[in-house]
Amino acid sequence: MDDGRFMERLMRSLQGAGADDVVISSINDDSIQLKFANSTISTTKSWNTQDIVVFAAVRGRTVSTSIKDLSEASLRTATKRIIAFADSLAPNREYEGIAKGPFSYAEVEGCYDPKVRSFGEEAPLLVERAIRAAAEEGVARSAGTLRASAVTARLISSGDVDVTEDQSGLYFSFRAMKDDEASGHAISVGRSLGGFDTEAAATRAARIAMMAQSPKTIVPGKYEVLFDHLAIANLLSVAGSAASIFSVESGLSFFKGKLGKRVASPIVSLYDDPRLPGGFGSSKFDAEGVPTRTTPIIEDGAYRNYLHNTSTAKRYKTETTANAGIISPSPHQVVMSAGDASREELIGRMRKGIYITNVWYTRFQNYETGAFSTIPRDGAFYVEDGEIKHPVKGIRLSENILNILAQVQGISKERRQVQGWEVDVPVLAPLVLTQPLNITRPGS
């Protein structure tokens, strides 16, 4: 049977079998993916997936599962298994229920481009143009991925919610490699074909790779740091997750106990913003069907809000921030407010520093304190008296996220959307300049 009818019948079946709360969502996803290596497209894949995700609360016991078989037999089996599994569990004493509708929804602009559904034939051409653009900059070896998806999502609940949304998404990752020590990485992320520019991303990556040739080592110590979009997005994505009340309760948040306190430089403001037009993580509803809203996390350096679903909000005697995950509240999309400087102006302010274009292997020694280390990847450059002097190699940033936020002294006007490997939560990221941070060597 079709997914809509299956969802509605499963809802009635679960309620008839004793479920108190039920949330059922469906995702119909048409996607394509191209991978390329050594400047040649190596794989092309397209697929359609149809997933049903079910949450049920039965006498205080909570169960979540997914279903792919939409047959009559599957419906009956799913109902029996969900109820039986719930009966085998202890009550979830922290569960306080789901949102009660009905709700009205305001659309988020720019989140669906119907042309993405027929994008398959154009995709190889965009990759080939990107490869040529990098070659024109002097880089003949490149690798990366292009993904495109068109999704229809529907959510119904026993709380009188029934909402549907169409979304599209485009992601392009390009790594340019001049030699074994000189590489650059750039991405293009968006919801529509307008503004999705693979050639511009390839050109940025290639120019970083060209600049990164013949890197030198530097003496470990304290250096000002200019984080490019990819590098700061890695850290801001973690900060967004740390804002979840679930992370706070689990001892995985450096924002624990910080509500109302100063946690960053006064020029830093950070938001969870699922209402951002064309935002990669934007949506008009959360996983309970609550209409989304913009939630300040940090405003002018002060910590403002933890992220809640309906259940956690009741426990803390506050309102949901429309950040369900039913089990674990989570950010939709982290947005850092823009500053007033250009990239060149930020570099010009640096007396002795490192310009980091990308990072990887970000690992936390202690999530609750914020202590972590990460390794700059691709081009990183030593800056002295406002000028890039030479590329650097063999360095590690060994720091604390709260200290980095506190040391911010400059933010760019330009912001870019970032999502990808090690950036799980989409981020709208500027460039960020900090006062001196700890630069060490890998392994130290």
Image (cartoon, rainbow, N blue to C red):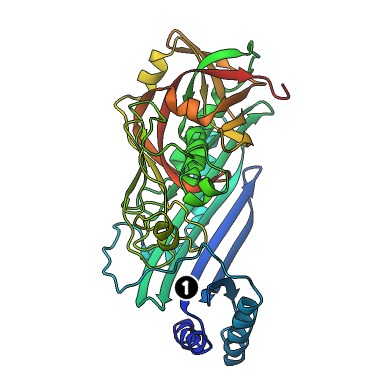
Q: Residue furthest bottom?
A: 72
Residue 140 is at least partly visible in this image: no
Give the left or right position of residue 211, taking residue 443 as reference: left
Binning the other alpha carbons within 10 Å of mark 1 as few (below 14), some (14 to 19) or many (20 upward) gives many
Q: Position of residue 331 (x, y in %)?
A: 44, 51
- Image point (38%, 63%), residue name: 115
Q: Position of residue 40 (x, y in %)?
A: 63, 47
Question: In this picture, is 418 found above or below 292?
Answer: above
User: Mark 1 sits on what residue?
Assistant: 25
Q: Position of residue 440 (x, y in %)?
A: 64, 19
Pick the front one: 404 or 360: 404
Give the quarter of the figure containing the C terminus.
Answer: top right
Pick the front one: 263 or 344: 263
Three-letter code for the amino acid on which mark 1 is drawn: Ser
Pick the front one: 89 or 126: 89
Q: How many numbered dots are placed on residues in this image?
A: 1
The local secondary structure at tag 1 comes to strand
Question: In this picture, is 192 found above or below 26?
Answer: above
Q: Position of residue 34 (x, y in %)?
A: 58, 55
Residue 157, quarter of the rendered image: bottom left
Give the left or right position of residue 258, taking residue 147 as reference: left
Q: Residue furthest right?
A: 443
- Image point (59%, 77%), residue name: 68
- Image point (30%, 59%), residue name: 108
Residue 417 is at least partly visible in this image: yes
Give the left or right position of residue 41, taking residue 94 as reference: right
- Image point (46%, 54%), residue name: 170
Pick the front one: 386 or 52: 52
